Amino acid sequence: MADRISTLPDSVLCHILSFLETKQAVATSILSNRWKHLWLSVPVLDFSITRLTDKDDNFRFNDFVYSVLLSRDATVPIKSFRLYVIYDYNEHVTLRIPSFAKWINIVLQRRVEYLDLHADIYGWPILPNTIFNCTTLVILKLNFFWIDPSCSSVLLLPSLKTLHLQFTTFPKHQDFMSLLGNCPNLEDLLISDLWFDYKEDSLALITRTLQALIMRRTL
């Protein structure tokens, strides 16, 4: 039987691969010479629901993500980047994401439009401030992160339309309000389990473009 899929144009094959998790897309490189480098041009990177239980798992995962990002052609955009990792730990092992900021900065440099980050880890990671002045970002979803106090000095997300924040900590209410104020095209806002290091007056959400708002357990 003829291999009809391999006769399709590279652009079509990359589109098909974009529906797979990145680990599966990379695995197609062993199919034939035609498929060997196709995954390098897939515009979607999806490192979904990875559960890490020990230091060896953590090392392999960090090495895999970093190698995927560094192997890609720097001129090929990354339209979507999803990271969903759960760290199981005990009192003897604390797992970290040592290259997290480097990963995100690489993705931002490739003109990312969709960024979905979920890092269920002991001691929430600090987001690099470069996220908050990305001009191409349209959708931003954050789970289990801590926002650096200095982020308010670089805020500008002119293309952002969807913002979902869950289990996220801001230094102050004003930092959160500054974020909203610098998203002039925001339409969809979800905030759940939002925390603040310093308690202030209650939040007052004011944004003229908002079309959908969901709020749950904001402290």
Image (cartoon, helix red, strand yellow):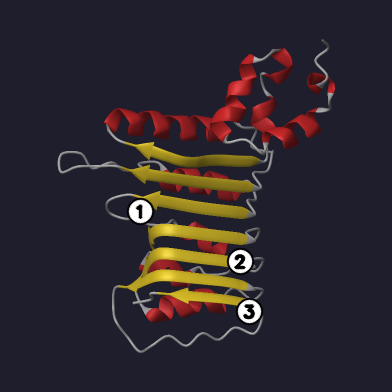
- Give the SS element for disc 1: loop
Q: Amino acid at mark 2?
A: Thr
Horizontal relation, residue 197 to residue 143: left or right: left
Q: Position of residue 181 (x, y in %)?
A: 55, 79
Query: Going from the N terminus, do you reach mark 2 or mark 1 first?
Result: 1
User: Is residue 147 in view from this perspective?
Assistant: no
* Front label number (2 vs 1): 2
Q: Who is closer to the viewer here, 2 or 186? A: 2
Residue 162 badge: 2
Horizontal relation, residue 138 to residue 193: left or right: right
Q: Quadrant of residue 124?
A: bottom left
Q: Position of residue 26 (x, y in %)?
A: 59, 26
Give yes or no for contact between labels 3 and 2 (Cβ–Cβ under 8 Å): no
Residue found at x 47% / y 65%: 165
- Give the SS element for disc 2: strand
* Distance of label 2 from label 1 (alpha carbons): 22 Å
Structural crowding at the residue carrying mark 1, measured as other residues with C-alpha within 10 Å and reported as few (<14), some (14–19) or many (≥20): some
* Distance of label 3 from label 1 (alpha carbons): 28 Å
Q: Position of residue 139 (x, y in %)?
A: 61, 60
Q: Quadrant of residue 147?
A: bottom left
66 versus 115 height, above or below: above
* Front label number (3 vs 1): 3
Per the image, the residue denoted by label 1 is 125
Q: Amino acid at mark 1?
A: Pro
- Quarter of the figure with the C terminus: bottom left
Q: Position of residue 151 (x, y in %)?
A: 44, 67
Horizontal relation, residue 102 to residue 120: left or right: right
Per the image, the residue denoted by label 3 is 210
Structural crowding at the residue carrying mark 2, measured as other residues with C-alpha within 10 Å and reported as few (<14), some (14–19) or many (≥20): many
Residue found at x 28% / y 41%: 95
Residue found at x 76% / y 30%: 13
Report the residue that reaches farthest toward the left. Answer: 91
